[in-house]
Image (cartoon, coloured by chain):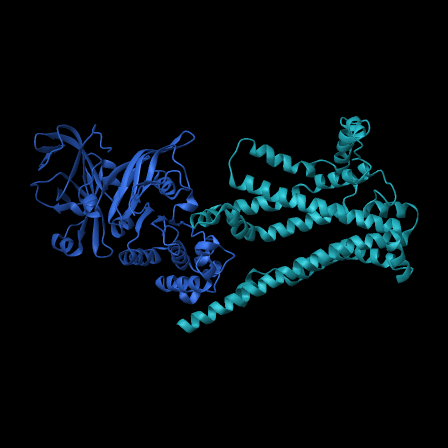
């Protein structure tokens, strides 16, 4: 029965083969080959040189700065994203559509423009520049500027993941929790958050990937001071321009590796959840048989 | 615990959802709020629960003002139309939720919670589903779990928002009977919202019929069905034939026909309503209210539906038992007279709101 219906609705064999081949070829050419090339180039002069080019002080400082930036940008945008999504999905208020547009702004503005915006605001010739100089606060060409620019470009990811999800789920479960006597805080931790955790995790992964990989905005505000204000992407560019291919690709491979790692973690968590649900389904089936 | 609703007003922008509503629900009663969509019944229920705040008026539980009590402190049970079970929790954890969020000092021990939850799951006959997730249950099972969850906190009042609205007809009928039996067993003051008049009349002790944010009539199901207080209630409670006529003295005159009235509502232009099963089809003209030609006969099932076209272009419907129909042996195209067994008469310009 199912065979007949699947044969009746399936495409001809050559169409299936052609489409599958096309898709696989595309993935191989545009994703796998470049990824392999990065690692190939990084290890082309041997393991020792690879390790050396990652542990030399300037590379090491770039790695630390990148991690530091992500350590600020991810939690900040996590809190902001959840708060914004909650406000937008659960409440009606004046200026709501304006807020939604505002959240999307970093997506629609070129990262370079975002960087220039901060220069205009905090730079030596900027609006707040003289005041900042007077009080000996450094923002551009220093770590705070890099963090600010990164927070700006990664601003929408969490909120954009959560808003449609929370709107689709509706407020019924939260209201049910409140009626059952849960406080606002308990409702948030025990109902709201668990319901959006996959969307949230995905938003955090995207935020983290972008925070570590951001080039344009950071490039403008960084000042490219070696060993001080270079993040990994900036460091890669410098090394590449100096024809230090092993060094450049070694650092690039680190970013690629971080991306692969986040994907593995995500798949692992999803797999564990699927297993837990399958186990519960089995227990239910057994209970049903036992009670029948 | 009794519920008193006093002078409640509620507006959403330009829309008046509730317009000066007053209602008392006695302790232990099962009351249905019945009305078409947009009549304000769900808003009223949500105001009782504390999920909505009224613009004016007060809500009293057991004589005490609860208007400004937060929803989480009202100790009400609320059953949502679409169940609103926590999808990431097992059935057990769903039912245990209300107990497990209590402050540590008043929270029952793990064993007590376990006993209570299993007892409630047995009460709703679903104890074997304790480990399942809501996504694995049927609609009827979900709604019973939602009910068990709301009962776990021993609510003072139980509020149900179209509890069977999303279920198919058969399950709905079973659950209806089951809710009635459950209420007879636990006697918690309950209010449920429905747009299904059959459901309201079958399940509840008293029915509150609402329209346009106002209460049209309150009464026992039988009372409301037999003595509807307004044209709206008459039409809403089931199929009905409408006649336009006049009341003069103790007679209702419709076209060429006159019908004696035991309790005339006054004098003047009138609307008369007769339910299809209260119309007697006959070949004799005495006591008739109308006459016409038989247009269609639908004879499927134990009841026969006859459509009669009157001279002035109106189609009337009469329903009779199959045996009566066989005795009469009416054929399409035949001329017949229609005689009312029972007629509800309202003056055309009367004000029937309460």
Quadrant of the image for the C terminus of chain B?
top left
Question: Is residue A192 something one can see in this rendering?
Answer: yes
Q: Nearer the viewer, residue A15 or B9?
A: B9
Q: Nearer the viewer, residue A12 or B117?
A: B117
Q: Colour of chain A?
A: cyan
Position of residue A66 measured from the top left corner of the image (x, y, whole percent): 78, 47
Q: Nearer the viewer, residue B322 or A127?
A: A127
Position of residue A33 measured from the top left corner of the image (x, y, whole percent): 80, 57
Q: Residue furthest front?
A: B105
Position of residue A98 measured from the top left corner of the image (x, y, whole percent): 59, 32
Which image quarter: residue A136? Answer: top right
| Up/down of B281 relative to A123, above or below | below
Q: Which chain is blue?
A: B
| Up/down of B293 relative to B146, above or below | above
Question: In the figure, is residue A278 to the left or right of A247?
Answer: left
Q: Residue furthest bottom?
A: A290
Question: In the figure, is residue A247 to the left or right of B338?
Answer: right
Which image quarter: residue A223? Answer: top right
Question: In the figure, is residue A63 to the left or right of B317?
Answer: right
- Give the residue drawn at x 61%, y 46%: A161
Question: Is residue A22 something one can see in this rendering?
Answer: no
Position of residue B277 measured from the top left corner of the image (x, y, whole percent): 18, 48
């Amino acid at each position: 029965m199912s065979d007949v219906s699947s044969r009746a609705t399936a495409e001809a064999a050559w169409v299936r083969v052609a489409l599958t081949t096309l898709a696989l070829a595309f993935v191989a050419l545009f994703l796998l080959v470049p990824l392999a090339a990065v690692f190939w180039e990084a290890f082309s002069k041997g393991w020792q040189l690879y390790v050396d080019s990652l542990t030399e002080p300037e590379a090491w400082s770039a790695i630390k700065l990148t991690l530091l930036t992500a350590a600020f940008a991810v939690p900040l945008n996590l809190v902001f994203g959840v708060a914004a999504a909650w406000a937008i999905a659960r409440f009606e208020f004046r200026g709501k559509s304006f807020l939604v547009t505002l959240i999307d702004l970093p997506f629609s503005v070129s990262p370079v423009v975002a960087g220039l915006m901060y220069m205009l605001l905090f730079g030596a010739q900027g609006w707040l520049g003289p005041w900042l100089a007077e009080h000996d606060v450094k923002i551009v060409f220093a770590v705070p500027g890099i963090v600010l620019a990164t927070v700006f470009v990664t601003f929408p990811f969490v909120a954009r993941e959560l808003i449609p999800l929370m709107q689709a789920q509706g407020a019924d479960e939260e209201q049910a929790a409140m009626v059952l006597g849960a406080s606002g805080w308990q409702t948030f931790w025990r109902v709201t958050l668990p319901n959006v955790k996959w969307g949230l995790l995905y938003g955090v992964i995207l935020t983290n990937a972008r925070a570590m990989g951001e080039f344009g905005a950071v490039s403008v505000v960084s000042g490219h001071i070696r060993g001080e204000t270079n993040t990994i992407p900036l460091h890669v560019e410098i090394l590449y321009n100096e024809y230090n291919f092993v060094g450049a690709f070694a650092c690039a491979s680190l970013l690629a590796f971080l991306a692969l790692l986040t994907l593995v973690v995500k798949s692992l968590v999803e797999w564990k959840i699927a297993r837990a649900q399958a186990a519960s389904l089995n227990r239910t089936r057994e209970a049903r048989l036992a009670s029948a | 615990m009794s519920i008193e609703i006093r002078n409640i007003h509620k507006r959403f922008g330009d829309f008046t959802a509730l317009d000066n509503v007053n209602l008392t629900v006695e302790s232990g009663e099962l009351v249905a709020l019945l009305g078409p969509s947009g009549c304000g019944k769900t808003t009223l229920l949500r105001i009782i629960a504390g999920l909505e705040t009224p613009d004016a008026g007060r809500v009293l539980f057991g004589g005490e003002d609860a208007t400004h009590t937060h929803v989480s402190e009202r100790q009400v049970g609320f059953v949502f139309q679409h169940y609103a079970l926590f999808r990431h929790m097992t059935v057990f954890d769903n039912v245990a939720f209300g107990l497990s969020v209590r402050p540590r000092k008043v929270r029952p021990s793990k064993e007590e919670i376990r006993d209570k939850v299993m007892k409630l799951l047995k009460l709703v006959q679903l104890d074997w589903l304790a480990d399942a997730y809501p996504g694995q249950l049927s609609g009827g099972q979900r709604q019973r779990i939602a009910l068990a969850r709301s009962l776990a906190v021993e609510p003072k009042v139980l509020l149900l928002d179209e509890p069977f609205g999303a279920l198919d007809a058969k399950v709905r009928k079973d659950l209806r009977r089951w809710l009635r039996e459950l209420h007879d067993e636990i006697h918690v003051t309950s209010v449920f919202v429905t747009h299904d008049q059959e459901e309201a009349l079958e399940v509840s002790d008293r029915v509150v019929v609402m329209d346009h944010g106002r209460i049209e009539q309150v009464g026992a199901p039988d009372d409301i069905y037999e003595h509807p207080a307004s044209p709206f209630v008459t039409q809403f409670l089931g199929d009905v034939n409408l006649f336009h006529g006049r009341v003069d003295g103790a007679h209702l005159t419709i076209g060429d026909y006159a019908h004696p009235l035991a309790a005339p509502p006054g004098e003047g232009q009138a609307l008369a309503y007769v339910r299809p099963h209260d119309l007697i089809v006959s070949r004799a003209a005495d006591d008739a209210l109308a006459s016409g030609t038989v247009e269609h006969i639908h004879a499927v099932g134990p009841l026969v539906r006859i459509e009669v076209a009157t001279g002035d272009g109106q189609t009337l419907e009469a329903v009779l038992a199959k045996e009566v129909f066989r005795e009469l042996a009416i054929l399409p195209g035949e001329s017949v007279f229609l005689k009312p067994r029972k007629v509800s008469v309202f003056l055309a310009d009367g004000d029937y709101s309460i």
